[in-house]
Amino acid sequence: MTNPERDRAKKYSSLKYTFNILDTAYLLALLLIFTGFGISRILAHRLLNLTANYYIIVPLYLLIISIFYYALSFPLNFYSSYILEHKFCLSKQKIQGWLKDQVKAGTIYYIISVILIASFYYIFKHFKYSWWWVVSIAWIFFSLILARLAPIVIIPLFFKYKKLSHDALRVRIMNLANKMRVKILDVFEIDLSSKTLKANAAFVGIGNTRRVILGDTLKDKYSEDEIEVILAHEFAHYKLKHLLKLILINSLATILAFYFIFITRDNILSLFGLSSLSDIAALPVLIMYLVVFGIMMQPFQNYISRRLEKNADKMALSVTGLKGAFVSMMEKLSNQNLADRSPRPLIKFFFFDHPPVDERINMAKECATYV
């Protein structure tokens, strides 16, 4: 017997997987064409005719290729992030708002890219044989700074941000944090409904920027028990030191990626008629390296993440005892977000950093000690 809602979620998820694959393949194809046909060398040469200052060339080069990439990928991006979301009634955002967010996100991405790439060239120039691990440390450190700044700088650029107005719920969340010995600045709500009908909540920040964020699409549609068990899960990540573990794993992946670039770069660069990574024309090769290595590492990182998420679910159930609320919350979330509740093993392997919904519900139901 078919379930129309599940079929709809399967169709939506299948399209999202397809667009994810197409987007990655398209990016790699453009990078190959841009480098293989010598377009990157021509652009680099013309910029070098303007100035020899690398710290001017890098932002200009990145700006030009970013604009071209965005223009060429706009149809795919527009369909996957705007049309598809409206087609499945997951968004009511107007096109003007979507375009405004695209400009904001693109600007942030560009600034971050300039910082990372400029630091790469600076380190590459001054650390001839040890650049690969120095770059790794610099990029890891920068990612930690971003994690600290995101709640107070980046999120408010996209959503209206205010302290939670529901006093009883706020007190309940603060009490839960105290019970689990988690220090938080406060509980905030954002107008997620202005852009999407999906629900979400998060525990974000590092140190004194650590805070709870509730989307209004979740706050207004879920019971206090359901919200409590969601946040118990988020707090469990902190208590079980999952963030630290993920930072270590991602740091190791970053170091391995740059070491692999270090030992193989000469052979790869020669395929494109390039002699050194110090040449700005070789930047697309560096990006290709990182994209391919990210694809290779993704299944392993997903597996680790699924293990951590399962442990966080177990602690949330243990702390709250809200098994019924956990199950009803997962049912609501999967319907509201059109989640693929039981993906095929290969899909789970490549795309899922959380256990599928049906697995999480079955795990909760099997925990007979919870009430």
Image (cartoon, helix red, strand yellow):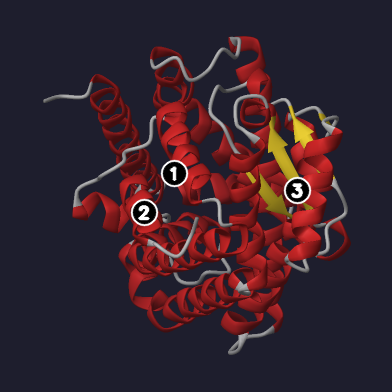
Instruction: Report the quarter where the N terminus lies.
Output: top left
Residue assigned mark 3: 212
Where does the image place residue 264, in percent across and percent down from the top left? 38, 79
Given residues 188 and 151, the one toward you in this image is 188
Marks 1 and 2 in Cβ contact (< 8 Å): yes
- Disc number lying in front (1 or 3): 1
Residue at 57% x, 23% y is 196
Could one spot residue 53 in this view of the protein?
no
Image-based side of 178 in relation to 245, left or right: right
Question: Tag 2: residue type?
Answer: Lys
Distance from disc 3 to disc 2, alpha carbons, whole Å, reads 27 Å
Residue at the image point whose x is 42% and y is 66% from the top: 301
Decide: is 282 above or below 151: below
Packing grade of label 2 (10 A; few <14, some 14-19, many >=20) is some
Q: Which mark is residue 234?
A: none
Quarter residue 120 falls in: bottom right
From the viewer's perspective, tell me whether residue 249 is left or right of residue 16: right
| Amino acid found under the numbered disc labelled 1 | Val
Residue 368 x, y percent position in the rendering: 39, 62
Disc 1 target residue:
327
The answer to whether the residue labelled 1 contacts the one labelled 3, judged by CB atoms less than 8 Å apart, is no
Residue drawn at the location 20% of the way across and 55% of the way down:
345
Earlier residue among tags 3 and 2: 3
Q: Secondary structure at mark 1?
A: helix
The mark closer to the camera, 3 or 2, is 2
* Above or below for 93 versus 206: above
Query: Alpha carbon of mark 1 to alpha carbon of mark 3: how far?
Result: 22 Å
Return the mark for residue 365: 2
